[in-house]
């Protein structure tokens, strides 16, 4: 299973209406501090984010991906929205 597929599967618990994951690892290859994990850009829309701050939304996402960080995911850029914010 690819890492993008793994991330998508784990985020299903948030019942997203939209998930977009872009692997940007090639743009960051060899930079200082990267021990091999990938760089990803995540855009996700979910009703679970309603009434939550951006920090709370990020925490919900990180809870699902925690054991992938930092070995498989070195960096994750997150845009977490509700349907009304699109």
Image: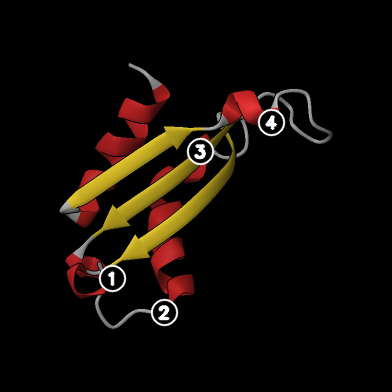
Q: In x, y percent, where is residue 56? A: 43, 72
Q: In x, y percent, where is residue 24? A: 55, 32
Label number found at residue 80: none
Identify the residue under disc 2: 53
* Alpha carbons under labels 1 and 4: distance apart: 30 Å
Mark 1–mark 4 contact, CB under 8 Å? no
SS category of the residue bearing label 3: strand
Position of the C terminus by quadrant: bottom left
N-term mark: 1 or 3: 3
Name the residue: 21% across, 45% down.
12
Position of the N terminus by quadrant: top left
Which of the 4 image quadrants contains residue 7? top left
Identify the residue under disc 4: 28
SS category of the residue bearing label 2: loop
* Alpha carbons under labels 2 and 3: distance apart: 21 Å
* Alpha carbons under labels 3 and 4: distance apart: 10 Å
Mark 1–mark 3 contact, CB under 8 Å? no
Label number found at residue 40: 3
N-term mark: 1 or 4: 4
Q: Within 10 Å of the Cα at label 4, are there few (<14), some (14-19), or many (20+) other Cα atoms?
A: few
């Amino acid at each position: 299973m690819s890492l993008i597929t793994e991330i998508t599967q784990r985020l299903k618990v948030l019942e997203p209406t939209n998930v977009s994951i872009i692997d940007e690892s090639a743009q960051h290859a060899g930079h200082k501090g990267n021990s091999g994990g990938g760089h990803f850009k995540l855009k996700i829309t979910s009703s679970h984010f309603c009434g939550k701050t951006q920090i709370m939304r990020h925490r919900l996402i990180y809870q699902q991906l925690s054991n992938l960080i930092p070995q498989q995911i070195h960096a994750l850029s997150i845009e977490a929205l509700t349907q009304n914010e699109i």
